Image (cartoon, rainbow, N blue to C red):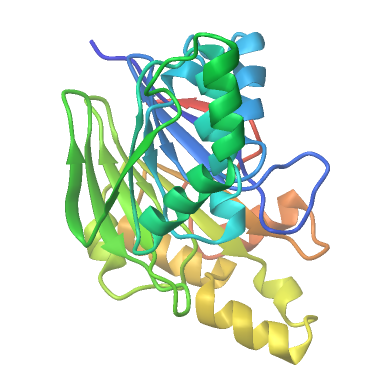
């Protein structure tokens, strides 16, 4: 029987928070992690999770990456992901999937750190492939499969950025990760009946206190607690996990209550290093 878990590495947003780093979720099957987004601090969270005994796998096992979109809070940790596990001894390149522009981003990161790569290769026996990344820019539909998982992508709506949500079929359960998006027609049908829905959210109650320009922006590219409750009523996930949560001054409990006022299923506000068995 395969063992599968979801590990919330980064539950935060672009807004700096003392106890949350930005977006990163790992789905691990038999200790092979599949990383969805790589915000700042994600690699350090893996070290912390391992040292705390939450996971058996290490940074050197981070060889599968899926980006929802190229905003910094979802990709700023990419240089760390490329080079820190390499120094730890990772032997394999990263197989990465994501939106248009990802190849260019990866190419420029490697160029920016050319001297770092040269010096480390000269100074000690780093592996030849452990810092490399093989990027596939994807469209909708099935985008990755191996002996453990099958991954599907659905176009998200996050302004004028190319963006995706992901659905991951594991031997245990199906997990859907929204990424950053406003509600998309067809998302509920695509995600319906999933075991775990990990979805971004902002507070509908606190939204009314934002300046008008920020109201226009967030309503155009993100999902409110009211909208998420409506989606969850259609999808009926086994567990609804909130991440990338925009509180704007309200408490965790108040945000969960906003969703639960219009949705009667299990709702959990996640924090960094929360782990869920599948």
Viewer-closest of 157 and 90: 90
Q: Quadrant of the C terminus?
A: top left
Q: Is residue 149 left or right of residue 240?
A: left
Using the image, determine if residue 124 lies above or below residue 32.
above
Viewer-closest of 3 and 165: 165
Viewer-closest of 104 and 198: 104
Using the image, determine if residue 272 lies above or below residue 202.
above
Coordinates of residue 261 in the picture (x, y in percent)? 58, 63
Using the image, determine if residue 225 lies above or below residue 134.
below
Coordinates of residue 245 in the picture (x, y in percent)? 64, 56
Q: Is residue 131 left or right of residue 272?
A: left
- Residue 217 visible to an observer of this rendering: yes
Q: Quadrant of the N terminus?
A: top left
Q: For residue 113, what is the image quadrant?
A: top right
Q: Is residue 124 left or right of residue 251?
A: left
Using the image, determine if residue 71 lies above or below residue 273.
below
- Residue 266 visible to an observer of this rendering: no
What residue do we see at 67% from left, 84% from top? 215
In this rendering, the count of numbered labels is 0
What residue do we see at 52% from left, 75% from top? 221
Viewer-closest of 233 and 221: 221
Which residue is outermost to the bottom? 212
Coordinates of residue 248 in the picture (x, y in percent)? 78, 65
Coordinates of residue 208 in the picture (x, y in percent)? 74, 82
């Amino acid at each position: 029987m395969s063992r599968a878990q979801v590990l919330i590495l980064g539950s935060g947003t672009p807004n700096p928070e003392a106890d949350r780093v930005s977006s990163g979720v790992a789905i691990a099957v038999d200790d092979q992690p599949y990383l969805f987004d790589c915000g700042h601090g994600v690699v350090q969270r893996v070290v912390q999770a391992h040292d705390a005994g939450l996971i058996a796998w290490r940074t050197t096992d981070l060889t599968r990456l899926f980006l929802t979109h190229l905003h910094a809070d979802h990709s700023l940790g990419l240089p760390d992901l490329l080079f820190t596990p390499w120094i730890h001894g990772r032997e394999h390149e990263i197989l990465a999937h994501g939106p248009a522009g990802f190849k260019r981003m990866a190419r420029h990161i490697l160029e920016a750190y050319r001297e770092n790569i040269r010096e480390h290769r000269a100074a000690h026996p780093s592996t030849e492939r452990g810092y490399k990344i093989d990027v596939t820019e994807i469209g909708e539909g099935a985008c990755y499969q191996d002996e453990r998982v099958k991954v599907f992508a659905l176009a998200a709506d996050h302004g004028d950025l190319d963006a995706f949500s992901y659905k991951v079929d594991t031997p245990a359960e199906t997990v859907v990760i929204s990424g950053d998006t406003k509600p998309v027609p067809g998302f509920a049908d695509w995600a319906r009946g999933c075991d775990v829905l990990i979805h971004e959210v902002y507070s509908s109650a606190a939204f009314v206190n934002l300046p008008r320009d920020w109201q226009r922006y967030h309503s155009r590219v993100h999902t409110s607690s009211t909208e998420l409750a409506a989606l969850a009523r259609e999808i009926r996930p086994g567990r609804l996990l909130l991440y990338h949560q925009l509180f704007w001054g309200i408490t965790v409990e108040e945000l969960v209550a906003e969703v639960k006022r219009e949705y009667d299923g299990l709702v959990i506000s996640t924090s960094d290093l929360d782990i869920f068995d599948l």
